Image: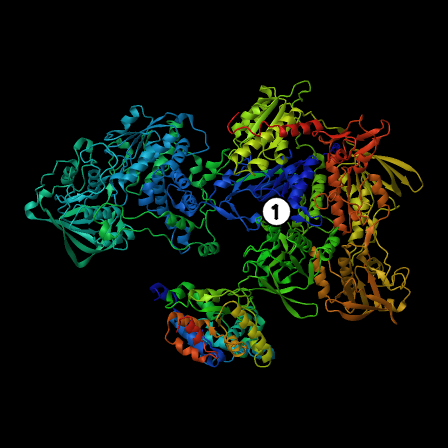
Amino acid sequence: MMPEGELGRAQMQFSYYPGCSLHATGQEYDASTREALAALGVTLVEIEGWVCCGASSAHSASSELALNLPAVNLALAQAAGYGDLLAPCAACYNRSKVADHVLRHEPARRQAVEEAVGFSFTGAVGVRNPLEVVHELIGLEAVHARVAQRLEGLKVVSYYGCLLVRPPRLIGFDDPEQPKIMNEILRGLGANVRGWSYATDCCGGSLSVPRRDVAARLVTGLVRHAREAGATAIVTACPLCQMNLEMRQADSPPMPVFYFTELMGLAFGLPQAASWWDKHLIDPTGVLDAAGLC
Amino acid sequence: MAKSEEGTPEKRPVGAVAVIGAGIGGMQAALDLADGGFKVYLADAGPAIGGTMAQLDKTFPTNDCAMCIMSPKLVETGRHLNIEILTMAEVVSLGGEPGDFTLRLRKKPRFVDTKTCTGCGDCAAACPIQRPDPFNANLSMRKAIYRRYPQAIPNAFAIEKRGEAPCRHACPIEQRAMGYVALVREGRFADAYRTIRQDNPFPSVCGRVCNHRCEDDCSRATAGDTAVSIMRLKRFVSDWARSHPDEIQPMALALAAQGPNAGRSPLEALQGARVAVVGSGPAGLTCAADLARLGCRVTVFEALPVPGGMMRVGIPAYRLPVVEVQSDVSDVLSLGIELVLNHRVEDASELLAQDFQAVFVAVGAPIGQKLRISGHELPGVLLATEFLRAVSLQSAGLADGASAGPGGQRTPTSEDGTGVMGKRVLVIGGGNVAIDAAMTALRLGALWVGMACLESREKMPAHDWEVRDAEAEGIQVYPARTFKEITGSDDAIGDPGTPAAGGTVSGDTNSANEEPDGRAPAPATGGTARGRCWSADAGNHVTGVRTARIIFRGFVGGRPDFDEVPGGEELIPCDVVIFAIGQRPDLALLPGEAQAGRRTIAVEGETLATQVPGIFAGGDAVTGTAFVVDAIASGHRAARSISAYLCQPGGPVAVWPPALDAGERPAQAVLDPQEARALLAAKPDRRAEPRKRPANERKRDFGEIEAALTEQEAVAEAQRCLECGICSECLQCEFACRAGAVRHDDREETVDLNVGAVILAPGLKTVAGNVRPEYGYAVFPNVITSLEFERMLSASGPYGGVVQRPSDGRHPRKIAFIQCVGSRDLTCGQDYCSSVCCMYTAKEAIMAREHDANVEPAIFYMDVRAFGKGFERYYKRAEHEQGVRYVRSMVSCVKEVPGSQDLRLLYATPDGKSTEETFDLVVLAMGLRPADGTLEMAERLGLRLNRFGFAESPPYGPAETNVPGVFVAGAFAAPKDIPETVIEASCAAAKAAALLAPARGTLARQPVYPEERNVSHEDARVGVFVCHCGINIGGVVRVPEVVDYVKSLPGVVYAEHNLYTCSQDTQERIKQHILEHGINRVVVASCTPRTHEPLFQDTIRQAGLNPHLFELANIREQDSWVHRADRDAATSKAKGLVAMAVAKAARLRPLYRRRVDMDHRALVVGGGPAGLTAALSLADQSFDVHLVEREEVLGGNLRHVRPGADASPQQVLADLIDRVGRNPRISVHLGARVSGVTGYVGQYRTTIRYGDGQAEELSHGAAIIATGGRASEPHEYLYGQHPCVITQRELESRLTDAGGTSPVASGSGDAESEDAAAGQGGAWVMIQCAGSREDAHPYCSRICCTQAIQNALAIKRRDRQAQVTILYRDIRTYGFRELLYQEARAAGVRFLQYNEDAKPAVAPAEHGLRVEVVAQPDGERFTLPADFVVLAPAIEPNDGAVELAQMFKVPLSEDGFFLEAHAKLRPLDFAADGVYLAGLAHSPRFVDETMAQAHGAAMRAAALLSRDQLQSAAIIASVNPRLCAACGICVDVCPYSARRINPDEGHAEVLEVLCQGCGACVAACPNGASYQRGFEFRQVFGMVDAALEEAWHDLPAGSS
């Protein structure tokens, strides 16, 4: 169990912005994020009345809309006062972070956004990603201390996709080319993390519907590289990547794709973990069984 | 010598120059100026000169070994009489004005004296600290004491320190903890022991009972891990030492021989001085040991029958076995200290009255105290100190006062117990002593033991682990208590009982009130404590202690501050109470004025001096109870004070030596948190915990509780050290250095230099390898930087020249080179081109193949920028002959293949497809940046930098800066290669020399020698000096045996061996022996003549011998280093080598140099910008100049240079011509050609002929060829056939002359084109390389890309609608010219690349022209309409070069340009002295580059012309006229034109001033008429005979 002092330090709370994915295709990301963070003493309060972040199309349709939509959520979080806004979905995080950056650094556009959304940006609330929260705010030591079963038999590669750490000028919590935070977290959980060079290569998620062939080619390549690195599973922090990776694989046997929060929950020995596997397109229990985890 | 300005009213400038940065540029500037008569200070931030060039393997385009060609310059710089080298120096400030500056430098400590260090390397062999070697791009390790590279100048080591390691910093005695930890890691336990003993005479004690503050401050601990187990490593070492006496013996001897202040001369006043030390505890004995080692006679008085103080009688044996104390103590006593036991000193002053000159009182604090509570007088109430002392003495069988002896019984039995057996014992107190008393009582068989104290459990003064140990043994702890009374049985009170033997201890105890009587027990007089502390027979007087629970807040004014907890009273039943609540000293022996109240002695804090002169006091007696290490510290301090006092008795006591003053101590090393994290991850993380005996077992006896670490554990534990101090200050280097050159107490110093000018040449560094993270540098082991690859290629590099992969050592087959990493890259702020990467990459690729023919190199590039002289050929050879694949594509990312760690490169093929290719190794061609520290330096100097941090020079002001009198050279001005750096260095030197010309020669020194002794009539009397070179030679070759052998050789009159023959004192010895023994030939057998021959030659010259009566036998590189394993063979070979040297020496003849008077005038041929600049530069340096120009006007090509709208080239030209015209030192000869040259360097006579046929003869000492070049005439693209096809120069004229794009004077004749071009929307097609880089001119003309872009921009500036297309092969806008290229692209200039084999086609069109081009890389065809086609023709040398070259006997390159002496390091010189070159005559270049070159050539000439006489070389060829047939072969083979057939004599002769001694003529002479002086046949055959002499082959070892 976590030592007393650590628990005291980790008493944090965030406004929580699940976005559409975590209420739909990424329910297991939603659940595992909430529960793994709760196990680390973090309280998440879902902001009421949140709206779409505009990730899928707004930014190509209207630059105003692309800012105003996430700004609505920022305004809600600011009003709620629970602290920074936690956006687990990489796309939501990205859009919110962009809006946050504009609001902080571009006074003219800020004024326009404030008028459109009807709030006054104070800057009190920032935008956070779960990876960043776990690594920087909670700290690996606290995570380590919470591990109940080490994921020793599980061979994985960390996968960020293209959005999570780019553009580095705005994001900056991990290296955009050779990221390492997720590796460190997973190693802390005891997982057998394999080195590979494809952590930030694109999975084609945005083309998954209009150009299935392109997405399938990219995904199949990524899975092959993961297999080449000796991994039996991919770990991600993005619901679009997770779905696309599981949905568009061509090779057999299929390779399951976990959210890193799921593996945190599993390592923490959370009983709920078993309920997350049902939500996967590719059943991960075989891989977990083989690793002696389940 | 040039005449100085006469009658100048201004004050004369200072004839000295500071050169900052000692790379190749700095060295060149320094040598030029020093040769030119100036004093030079050459400062470098590093420990050695040589800069980046020293790290390079080969150099392009000649493939010379960088070190081989640089090494002579290093040696020359190092030995130059007028160059003073300052290493580890950085600029602090600059004051004053040009001509008279004060430059302040900060010299960082080097910790090795460069004058004493001989560079032998014994220190590095002894150093335990491994560091990544930045010289080898961190691919290998070096030691903390290091030399930058083997050939380094100064040839001296330096020590890398980060500060004092925290462990040492925290320690009261500054124990070199990191030092012995490092030695343990190396398995060097004897060395570790010596290092410990250096500061600490009690390693066995401190290895067990120290409170190890070192571990509290350990960087591991502060970084969140557990500290290194430093104390237990010390115990391991002391245990090991104890069990290896034979190996420790030499250490002990060395230690005894060496005072605590090694390296300092012993102080006379201390020799035999008598000092008394009162008390043999750690303070007293430490002081005694230090003073004994300084030469004092020390007597130690001890009241007890055993020495050691509290170490011996205060600490129970289960923590500190008696034998350990005894052994440390006897080591100390073995230094010759007299010990008087059982002697209580009653009055310290009396000792002074006797024959002691000083007294150190270190009587400790042995007197225990009791609480004044009811019942404290009861018989069962004891004092812990006395209890423990009694137990200790009893166990040694000393209770009756017998003398101390080893082998005391360690485990007291119940029979001789102290009366606690079977009793319930309560100890009052919560400190270490209380625990000791409690655990001792338990071991003595107490029925029950408890401890009670004021403090809460957490705040107990004892260590937590101690309390836990006690609890584990069953001792019950009662924290947070106050004590109300000691209850006793009524019948017993007032009955003191009968002490068993009436001993003092029990007697005192029983009679004690709240205070004992102020006397420590005196066993000698009292018959102490026999059997028991108190009599068990006395009955159960004590029944318990009434306590109350409290909340304790601490002590206020010495009194406890607490609140009682209501209802917290408790009676703890017990039979015996032991007080352990504090101790105080016995002060009766001191006179009243030295006491401070009852408790401690009053001393001066720093010096430990009491009020009584001559009496010092320290240890617990002064501080109250403290730790052993504090007492030792006090002893050291007392010894320093006493020695100072003895040197100056009666005077004020200075703290001595000053190096140990608090203010002088170096700062504590602080590890950067990031580095600490990396180190923590890389090193073993689990602290070795000592094994403890189980509580149940250990509490039965006094056997030691903790076991020592095993050797394996100790080494593993030592590996955990983060080595935060870098140097561990273990002193092993100091022990190893026989020359005494190590100076660990070096401190930073400030140096002020008075100089007239400053030249900055701080050099470059490469961009960080991870500047483009997508290439995975530092993530993938097989992605390396170009510098790393350079070191890999180097034969002296980390891999010995074997190209191998870092990941697995496998030879790579496919190597990818990626260009422009950190160059031409806006995304990382490196917009400029680094100028050199294309070429060094080509070289690296070629070299890789030379090392391993199987290598398949591929170079990924954007443009190949082979713009320098000979570069294009080199590049073409790489591509077409050396199998280097060139891929014009930037690599988008590098991925690593799992398992093999091969690398996948993703790039676009010419057809636009993305492709992936796997390589074994990837080399990143890193861009260049200014060196570290230059930004700060610039700030301090007020220097203007450009946005990339390079020094800015004004246009056409090469080497100048915005600060007058401060000049810049090399890569600090812009990224550049070696020749450009050398040129600019000479240019900067020229400008400094011009500024300081009136002071030339004022500060430069000339060597002064005695008159040479004539030895021609003497028989050979050879003196031989054989060098041990520390252990370099002496460790292999039996040097004394060689000397004995040598003495038997014919002609040898004297032979000896030296530790270092090159050391300063041996030089003096050699001179002495030459005089004493009438030696007339000297042989030294040592290391390499390359560095050392000039030194010894100078020495014998100082003794009056001709320097060439010297011979050197290399018995290091050629013997001891290669035959390490076979001492016999090596010794035998050494004899042979020396015998050969002696044989030659006996036949040596003095050699003399020919002298020629210098004509100080110069001739400059060519009146273009190069010639004008060179003439002015020379004149400014006070030399008269003839300037010869064949045209009737001055200006050359510069007359036509009008880049863009910028008219300044014409202003520059006008200014040059004006200054030349007005300068009285310059005679201009217009319309004249050189028609004949006679004479030689120093004395030339050149005939010039004017257009009218008139001739004139000019005399001069040197000449500069600056005859320029010209644009070639294009023969293609309709040039000359179509009026709208023009050259760039013609375009320039149109752009400037008539203020627009109007027709040139002659008119193009094509009105429509003219109209279109003049109006809006004109179409311009520029074709690059219209003549260059093809058969007629197979070189790059260097300037055309930039010229075209400038003109394109000029067009665009006038007319934004204009369509400008540049058809190019590679854009070669090197350096900051790259920014123009960027600007042009941004301005909409179109760039289309074509290949040489598919040139554009130009055809007339209905309107103007039509240009067809196949654009690369994808081969798309374009048809471009053009109003004008602009061609960039090649630059070629002017005609007449061939004739001029013949007249001056200098060579031309295959392209017809003048050929310099060496492409890299002598770019301004010809092989023959006295002729220099500059400008387009050398190669195509820009005007500012030409001007730099002209200044440089002028400097090279000035360095020569400033001499009054020239000397020929000594080792030159000579002719025996009787054998000469005048066949002339020698004349043909001489590369220096130093040979001719004398027409009058009819035989060949040598022009001695020109001869360079290469020996070609000697080898070529068919008659044997030519010979080489210093290598005459009889000398060489004499050597051969000696070599074949059997004598030394079969000499049995040891014979003589």
Asked where in the image residue B1401 lies, by quadrant, the reply is: bottom right
**In the displayed image of the protein, which residue is found farthest to the right?**
B1252
**Amino acid marked by disc 1:** Ala
Direction from residue A53 to residue A12 in the image, left or right: left
Q: Secondary structure at mark 1?
A: loop
Residue B1156: image location, x then y, percent: 77, 29
Report the label total: 1
* Chain identity of mark 1: B
Is B775 placed above or below B1555 here? below
Work out which quarter of the rendered image holds the N terminus of chain B and state it.
top right
Classed neighbour count for the residue bearing mark 1: other residues with Cα under 10 Å, few (<14), some (14–19), many (≥20): few
Q: Residue furthest top?
A: B1017
Q: Is residue B19 left or right of residue B277?
A: right
Q: Nearer the viewer, residue B1114 or B20?
A: B1114
Q: Name the residue at 70% across, 38% down.
A: B996
Q: In the rendered view, does A246 fall on the left or right side of B275?
A: right
Could one spot residue B1072 in this view of the protein? no
Residue holding disc 1: B795
Of B1319 and A201, which appears nearest the observer? A201
Corner quadrant of residue B925? bottom right
Find residue B830 and report its horizontal and vertical position in percent. 63, 58
Q: Is residue A269 visible?
A: yes
Above or below, B168 relative to A24: above
Residue B415 x, y percent position in the rendering: 14, 42
Snapshot colouring: rainbow
Which residue is nearer to you in this view: B1561 or A43? B1561
Q: Is residue A257 above or below residue B1372?
A: below
Residue B912 picture quarter: bottom right
Task: Single out the residue that lies furthest toward the left.
Answer: B491
| Relative image position of residue B290 (x, y in whole percent) | 37, 33
